[in-house]
Image (cartoon, rainbow, N blue to C red):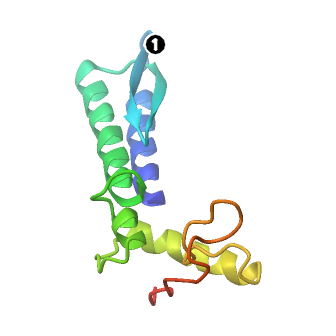
């Protein structure tokens, strides 16, 4: 996931560093994760480069949404939370590894394998998942 963000930022920086002319502001906005985002790019960016940057941003956010949206019934995390046997991608496994280390560090106070906790307790009172080997 970090590599993707770095790739997009490097692409953007390359586009802006190659410009030595008058700078303009390109405004990119859209929807992701149930909210709006807005990005202002300052530089001499061609219309083609602007469309390419927007396409890369939309693609990254779409991929992250497909992995992490708890509202999208086709997303990996939604299906995983429902107990489905779903293939886990590298982004999901990276977050799962981090969650595992945070859980160990806090002696289980933060446990992503536990069911939803509305008011500090689970609906069923029991754990439903174990960490897959990652």
Q: Is residue 41 above or below residue 82?
A: above
List the single residue furthest toward the front: 124
Q: Residue at x 46, y 85 (%)?
A: 134
Kindly state the secondary structure of the residue where label 1 is placed.
loop
Q: Residue at x 29, y 45 (%)?
A: 59
Residue 47 coordinates in the image, percent (x, y): 26, 19
Query: Residue farthest to the right?
Result: 106
Nearer-the-camera pick, 93 or 78:
78
Task: Work out whether residue 90 or residue 31 is closer to the camera in this orientation and state it.
Answer: 31
Give x and y (percent) for residue 102: 68, 75
Read off the residue under disc 1. 23
Whether residue 55 is situated above or below residue 108 in the rendered picture? above
Percent x, y of residue 122 = 61, 72
Task: Tell me if 62 is positioned left or right of 29 in this view.
Answer: left
Q: Is residue 49 left or right of residue 106?
A: left
Q: Quadrant of residue 99?
A: bottom right
Residue 85, x across and y down, in percent: 29, 80
């Amino acid at each position: 996931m970090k590599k993707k963000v770095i790739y997009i930022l490097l692409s953007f920086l390359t586009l802006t560093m190659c410009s030595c002319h008058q700078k303009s502001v390109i405004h990119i906005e859209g929807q992701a994760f149930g909210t709006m985002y807005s990005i202002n790019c300052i530089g001499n960016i061609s219309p083609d480069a602007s469309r390419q940057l927007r396409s890369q941003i939309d693609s990254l956010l779409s991929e992250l949404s497909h992995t992490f949206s708890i509202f999208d019934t086709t997303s990996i995390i939604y299906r995983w939370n429902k107990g489905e046997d779903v293939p886990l991608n590298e982004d999901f496994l990276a977050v799962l590894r981090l969650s595992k280390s945070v859980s160990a560090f806090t002696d289980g106070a933060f446990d992503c394998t536990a069911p939803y906790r509305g008011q500090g307790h689970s609906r069923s009172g029991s754990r439903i998942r174990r960490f897959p080997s990652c």
